[in-house]
Image: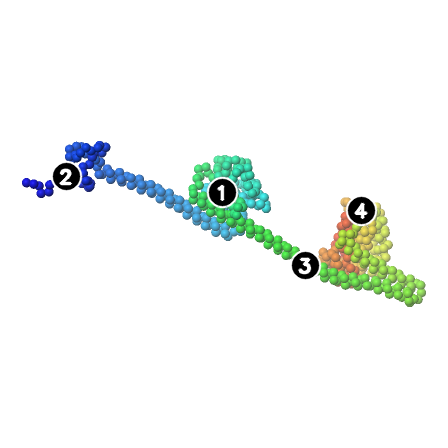
Amino acid sequence: MASPNPPTGPQPLPGKGSSGPKPLPGKASSGPKQIGTGPQVARPQGAELLAELMQTQRQLTQSMLEVRDLRSKLNRRSHHMQVLQHVSEILAATSKGGQVVSVVLDVLVQEFQCPRGAVWILEDGGASYVPREGAGLPRPAWSSLRLPAPNPFPDVPLVLFQSQFLDASCGPELLEALRGPEEAALYFVPFEHQLLLLGFAILAMPRDRRLEDEDQDSISILQRQTAVSLYNAWLFRDLSEQRDALQRQALELERVNVALREADQLKSEFLALTSHELRTPLTGILGFTRLVLDGLYEDAEEMHSMLQDSYLSGQHLLGLLNDILDLAKIESGRLEVHPEPSSLAILLEEVKPIAEAYPRRPGVHLVWPDLEELPEVMVDPSRLKQVLLNLLSNALKFTKEGSVSVQVERRPGHMALSVVDTGIGVSLEAQARLFQKFAQAEGGHAREYGGTGLGLVICKHLMEMMGGTIGLHSEGLGHGTTMRITMPIA
């Protein structure tokens, strides 16, 4: 009796689809084989699953290592970004190059564990790079490391706008302190803006330190930030200097304008007073001459007196005109002096009778020094007499009571001659203006006592041209005045 489900061919192994008999591994099949007629050589199903599991585990382990590495890089990149953001905020808030390089050097040294480092910036009008900040070294060790511009290492080919490790031949003497005893590698970090190397940092990198891509990216970002900050600081400093220069010029112009206004006012007053001063003696000359011509005198003595007054008025007028002419020569540079060895005693003897004839108040005494054994001085005799007569005339004119004395003192290399009076004195404010043109025309005593205010200005120029000096001392109004001149001994 036939089986209800007879087999139609060889049966496959469980879990395996097959369309026919399987040959043994490594052997060519010559025909169908009967199941169970030989040894089982096919690999068990569990072994294949174990192999696949181990392969998957290896791939998973590799993926975990890659993820861990990527996470480490991401954390470092995130840390760099936080640092750079903090640095950018600091750099944006400062306009001083010194603060910029200090912050940048601190960041570079700390982030890359550098034992030493220094930063140079372009200074001296672009002539050299000057070290402005150092780390890990005493200040004397890096403050003298000045480098030339525009190429700080002219003997070594470098791409100055690119970060790179410096060759051992770069500045072996200058940068020896940065390399240190462990001979650290030197890393060059330039700060370039608009093709101008504004500065650079040199870091002593540990030999085992390896810069990753994210490190170099962070350094590039920091370079750009630093370069822009240094450029802005440079512009700010330049603008500040220009502003300060403009302010100084404005103040100077204001001072000059004030001086011009004062000079214009004094000149106007001088012209008015000089006109009066010139008209007064001229009126006297014309009046006395008219009286003599008309015969309006009683006798020869009265006529002689009129002529004498007319002569004195003429002398006074001539003195005023000479002062004006001398000032014009001084301002045009045509006034000349001819110093020569001259006897000071003889000069004082010649001045004495002229000064004695000057008008003075009753009771005012003129005191002269002992003229014996006075040395010769190197002066222009006529110009020194002009100075002395001017000083004596002023002293007698401004002294109402007391005395006017001439004092001579020998000092190393020069003689000092003083005219001391007990007159009205000079206020402390007016003393600074007394040797300026038209100073006496300012009013007050000038109008009471007359004069053009040119005498002391001319005396000052004459004494300076003869190699001497002139000065004034007064404790104030009512305390008298001392005028002192010095002249070199021949």
For badge 1, the amino acid type reads: Gln
**Is 11 placed left or right of 360 in the picture?**
left
Q: Earlier in the sequence, mark 2 or mark 3?
A: 2
Q: Quadrant of residue 362?
A: bottom right
Q: Residues within 10 Å of mark 1 (few under 14, many from 20)?
A: few
Q: Earlier in the sequence, mark 3 or mark 1?
A: 1
Left/right placement of residue 359 relative to residue 475 reads: right
Residue designated by label 4: 378
- Camera-near label (4 vs 1) is 1
Question: In the image as oriented, which residue stretches furthest toward the front?
Answer: 30
Q: Which residue is mark 2?
A: 9
Quarter that holds the N terminus:
top left
The answer for how far apart the CA atoms under marks 2 and 1 are is 79 Å
Chain-order first, disc 2 or disc 1: 2
Where in the figure is residue 402, as x and y percent of width and height? 81, 58
Residues at marks 2 and 3, CA–CA distance in whole angstroms? 128 Å
Give the left or right position of residue 325, taking residue 218 as reference. right
Residue 489: % across, % down: 79, 45
Pointer 4 or 1: first along the chain:
1
Which residue is more in the foreground, 341 or 213?
Answer: 213
